[in-house]
Amino acid sequence: MKKKSDVMAGIVDDIRRIYQVLTEQSQRVEYETSLTASQLWAVKILEESSPLKASDLARRMYLHPATMVGLLDRLETKSLITRTRSDKDRRVVHIELTEQGQEVVKKSPEVVQTLLVRGLEKNTLEKLNAVSAGLEEIIRILGVQELSPLPIMSSYFAIPKRRKKTPVQPQ
C-alpha cells in the first residue's frame, strides 16, 4: 500500500507533466506557425469542416461564443479565415478557411487540445465523471472555482509589465 506522501507526490508530478506538455506544445505551435495553440486548433477544425457557424466552432472547441470573437478577429487579421453573414439570418456568421489558412494547416504540428479531446472521447461516461471529480477537487484545493476558464495556454490575459521607474530630475 502506498503512503499518502507518495500518492501526493505522484499527483504533483502528474500536474507538472500536464503543464510541461501544454507549455512545450504551445511554444512549438507558436514557433512553427506564429499562432497560439487555440488559434491553430480553430484553423484545424475549420480545415476539417469549413464553413462553420461561429457558435458551432465555439461548441467544438468547448469555448464560450464570446471568447470566439477575439480569436476569430486575430485569425481574420492574419488572413487565415473569412467571415460571411448569412443572407437568410443576418445574426449568423459563417467562418471559412482561406487558402493561406489551408497552407498553415498543412505545415503545422498537432495541437494538444485535439489530443485531449480525442482521448477523452474514447472514455466511458463513468471514467469521464471520475476524471472530472478529480479535477474539480484540484480546482477546489487551489481555490480557483470562480475563475473563468480561458483557452489552453492562451495569451488572452496580459500580465502587467513592471513599470520602469522614472528617474527624478534634479531641480
Image (tube, helix red, strand yellow):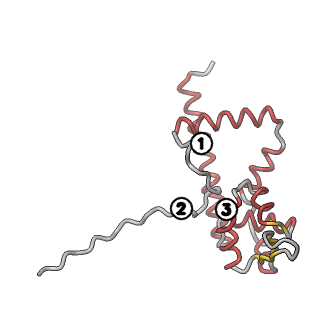
Q: Position of residue 64 (x, y in %)?
A: 69, 56
- At mark 3, the secondary structure is helix
Q: In the rendering, which numbered label is found on residue 157?
A: 2
> Looking at numbered disc 3 in the image, what kind of residue is underneath it?
Ala
Q: Is residue 25 visible?
A: yes
- At mark 2, the secondary structure is loop
Please state if 17 lies on the left or on the right of 91 as rendered. left
Where residue 42 sits, quadrant-wise, is bottom right
- At mark 1, the secondary structure is helix
Q: Position of residue 23 (x, y in %)?
A: 60, 56
Q: Position of residue 165 (x, y in %)?
A: 28, 70
Q: Position of residue 139 (x, y in %)?
A: 58, 39
- Counting residues from the start of the chain, the first of labels 3 and 2 encountered is 3
Q: In the rendering, which numbered label is found on residue 15?
A: 1
Residue at 62% x, 45% y: name it: 17
Residue on which the image places disc 3: 66
Q: Residue furthest top?
A: 1
